Image (cartoon, grey):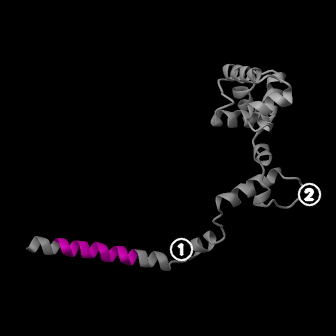
């Protein structure tokens, strides 16, 4: 029984010391100074942080950009040239100009084989063949959503 009381007393002593230390901390001038300094920093949302970062690349005559005005081009424009170059090298560098033009038409036709064929005056089978060829060259299938996005981003970076 005596051991139990001494343990309880030890816990009480430790708890009392912790409470006293915390009280001293929260009432100290250093803590007040810390709170004052930290209150000057804002908690920005992801969207606000993105806007602030992108404004470095905005037209110098504009002072701000609204979130609604953000475009894919603006986001891609914020990427460093070295990143763009590596992305292009890993995606479409092996494609020739005709393949690039074909993909742009294909994406502007909203991935419609029929509309792509009509715009390029090609047979649907030829469009299928070119899509397969691009898949073989790049390892990316323009008909699969994720691969199509990768290729579309690469075209947008050019």
Viewer-closest of 117 and 65: 117
Corner quadrant of residue 17: bottom left
On the image, the x and y values in percent for residue 107 come to: 77, 36
| Magenta stretch, residue numbers | 7-21
Name the magenta segment's main secondary structure. Answer: helix
Taking the spot 49% from the left edge, 80% from the top edge, the residue there is 27
Q: Which quadrant would the N terminus be assigned to in this image?
A: bottom left
Q: Is residue 10 left or right of residue 22?
A: left
Corner quadrant of residue 79: top right
Asked if marks 1 and 2 touch (Cβ < 8 Å), the reply is no
> In terms of secondary structure, where does tag 2 sit?
loop
- In the rendering, which numbered label is found on residue 31? 1
Taking the spot 73% from the left edge, 37% from the top edge, the residue there is 153
On the image, the x and y values in percent for residue 103 come to: 78, 30
- Reading the image, the residue beneath label 2 is 61
- In the rendering, which numbered label is found on residue 21? none
């Amino acid at each position: 029984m005596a051991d139990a009381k001494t343990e309880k007393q030890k816990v009480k002593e430790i708890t009392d010391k912790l409470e006293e230390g915390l009280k001293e901390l929260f009432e100290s001038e250093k803590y007040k100074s810390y709170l004052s300094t930290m209150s000057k920093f804002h908690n920005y949302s992801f969207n606000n942080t993105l806007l602030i970062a992108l404004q470095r690349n905005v037209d110098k005559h504009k002072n701000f950009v609204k979130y609604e005005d953000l475009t894919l081009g603006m986001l891609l424009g914020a990427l460093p040239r070295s990143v763009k170059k590596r992305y292009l090298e890993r995606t479409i560098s092996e494609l020739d100009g005709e393949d690039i033009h074909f993909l742009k038409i294909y994406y502007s036709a909203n991935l419609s084989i029929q509309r792509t064929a009509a715009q390029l005056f090609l047979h649907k089978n030829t469009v299928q063949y070119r899509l397969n060829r691009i898949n073989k060259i790049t390892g990316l299938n323009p008909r699969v959503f994720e691969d199509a996005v990768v290729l579309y981003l690469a075209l947008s970076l050019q």
